[in-house]
């Protein structure tokens, strides 16, 4: 598991600081992101679970396939992840949803000062087909 040094973070026992910094892994970052979504946006448990699941799956893929962590991933890593989703038969809608979760996570990480630039900025979402019209009876 990849560890990253980040500014002090809130732990169960209070603020943990090692000269102003604390080590955090991807799962802790995802948990803090989910807490923010619940506190600031009031998202439902099912929505939070979906975000966390998508981010955990991305983190696991990055760890296994690219030997890197989610928080330190580069644009090229994320493009490879999205390409792999398509190769495995996932729909464009699934890829778009996962990219949306990644974008929101990295925007949060940028605001919190964990990263210096958002690796999802120049990644285009997959094109979604328009649903066929339904007939009226």
Image (spheres, rainbow, N blue to C red):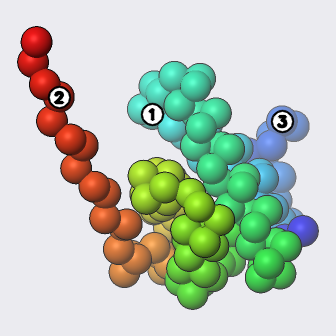
- State the residue position of label 3: 12
Give the CA distance from mark 1 to mark 2.
37 Å
Q: Residue at x 45, y 25 (%)?
A: 42
Q: Are the residues tagged 3 and 2 within 8 Å (C-beta)?
A: no
Which is closer to the viewer, label 1 or label 3?
Answer: 1
How many numbered callouts?
A: 3
Whether residue 81 is visible here, answered yes or no, is no
Q: Residue at x 31, y 57 (%)?
A: 128
Q: Residue at x 74, y 72 (%)?
A: 62
Q: Residues within 10 Å of mark 1 (few under 14, many from 20)?
A: few
Give the CA distance from mark 1 to mark 3.
20 Å
- State the residue position of label 1: 40
Left or right of residue 93: residue 34: right
Left or right of residue 53: residue 127: left
Find residue 4 and report its image quarter: bottom right
Q: Position of residue 38 (x, y in %)?
A: 53, 30
Which is closer to the viewer, label 1 or label 2?
Answer: 2
Q: Position of residue 99 (x, y in %)?
A: 48, 61
Q: Secondary structure at mark 3?
A: loop
Closer to the N terminus: mark 1 or mark 2? 1
Closer to the N terminus: mark 1 or mark 3? 3
Specify the label residue 74 is tagged with.
none
- State the residue position of label 2: 134
Which is closer to the viewer, label 3 or label 2?
Answer: 2
Q: Residue at x 90, y 68 (%)?
A: 1
Q: Are the residues tagged 1 and 3 within 8 Å (C-beta)?
A: no
């Amino acid at each position: 598991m990849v560890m990253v040094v980040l500014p002090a973070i809130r732990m169960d026992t209070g603020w943990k600081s090692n000269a102003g910094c604390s080590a955090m892994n991807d799962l802790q970052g995802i948990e803090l992101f989910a807490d923010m979504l619940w506190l600031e946006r009031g998202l439902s448990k099912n929505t939070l679970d979906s975000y966390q699941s998508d981010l955990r799956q991305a983190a696991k893929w990055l760890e296994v396939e690219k030997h890197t962590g989610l928080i330190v991933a580069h644009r090229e890593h994320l493009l490879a992840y999205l390409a792999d989703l398509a190769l495995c038969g996932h729909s464009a809608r699934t890829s778009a949803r996962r990219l949306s979760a990644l974008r929101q996570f990295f925007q949060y990480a940028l605001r919190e000062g964990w990263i210096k630039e958002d690796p999802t900025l120049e990644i285009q979402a997959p094109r979604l087909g328009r649903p066929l019209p339904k007939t009226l009876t």
